[in-house]
Amino acid sequence: MLHIRAYIDGAAKGNPGYAGAGILLIDEKDNAELMRLSVPLGKQTNNIAEYSALIIALEKSLELGAERIDIFSDSQLLVRQMTGEYKIKNQAIAKIAMKAYNLLARFEKYGFKYIPREQNKIADHLASLAAAAQ
């Protein structure tokens, strides 16, 4: 059974501005790095970039055959919205969140955890690279 730790981040140079998503996927069992992604997103807000990173991480984890996933993000807003602690008022975010919930339903188990930016350096760097590359 594949259990993935997904470290995600979104960055926008300006808000909105050129944005990028950074994703690091780790196999929970042996701590092996499975994938690093730096994805340019065009002009987006920072919050859309954060949610885009989540969608990409979920899709890639499912492609790898993951049955469990723990998502680590330095976006308190994303974590609190996805766990139901905060309501999603922005319609664009609500649409992406619904897609995320549909993807999450395909996992046996999932969880979200807020981490400080210092603990999310790789995903942060990958997101910044993608945003700057446009």
Image: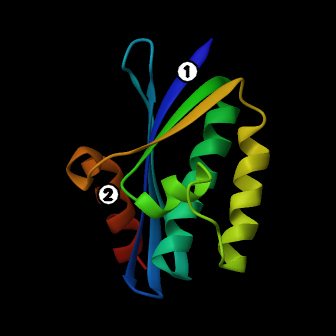
The structure residue drawn at horizontal position 51% and vertical position 69%, both measured from the top left corner, is: 49
The structure residue drawn at horizontal position 32% and vertical position 46%, both measured from the top left corner, is: 115
Give the quadrant of residue 111.
Answer: top right
Counting from the top left corner in percent of width and height, residue 108 is at: 72, 23
Residue sitting nearer the eye, 119 or 20: 119
Kindly state the secondary structure of the residue where label 2 is placed. helix
Disc 2: which residue = 124
Disc 1: which residue = 3
The structure residue drawn at horizontal position 56% and vertical position 55%, both measured from the top left corner, is: 85
Residue sitting nearer the eye, 116 or 34: 116
How many numbered discs, if any?
2
**In the displayed structure, does residue 132 sit left or right of residue 29?**
left
Q: Residues within 10 Å of mark 1 (few under 14, many from 20)?
A: many
**In the displayed structure, does residue 74 sit left or right of residue 80?**
left
Gap in Å between the C-alphas at discs 2 and 1?
22 Å
**Where is 13 relative to 100, above or below?**
below
The residue sitting at the front extreme is 85
Q: Quadrant of the C terminus?
A: bottom left
The structure residue drawn at horizontal position 57% and vertical position 62%, both measured from the top left corner, is: 86
- Tell whether label 1 touches label 2 (CB within 8 Å): no
On residue 121, the disc is none
Counting from the top left corner in percent of width and height, residue 33 is at: 39, 28
Counting from the top left corner in percent of width and height, residue 45 is at: 50, 81
**Where is 4 relative to 89, above or below?**
above
Give the quadrant of residue 89.
Answer: bottom right
Q: Earlier in the sequence, mark 2 or mark 1?
A: 1
**In the displayed structure, does residue 82 sit left or right of residue 112?**
right
What colouring does the structure picture have? rainbow
Answer yes or no: is residue 40 visible. no
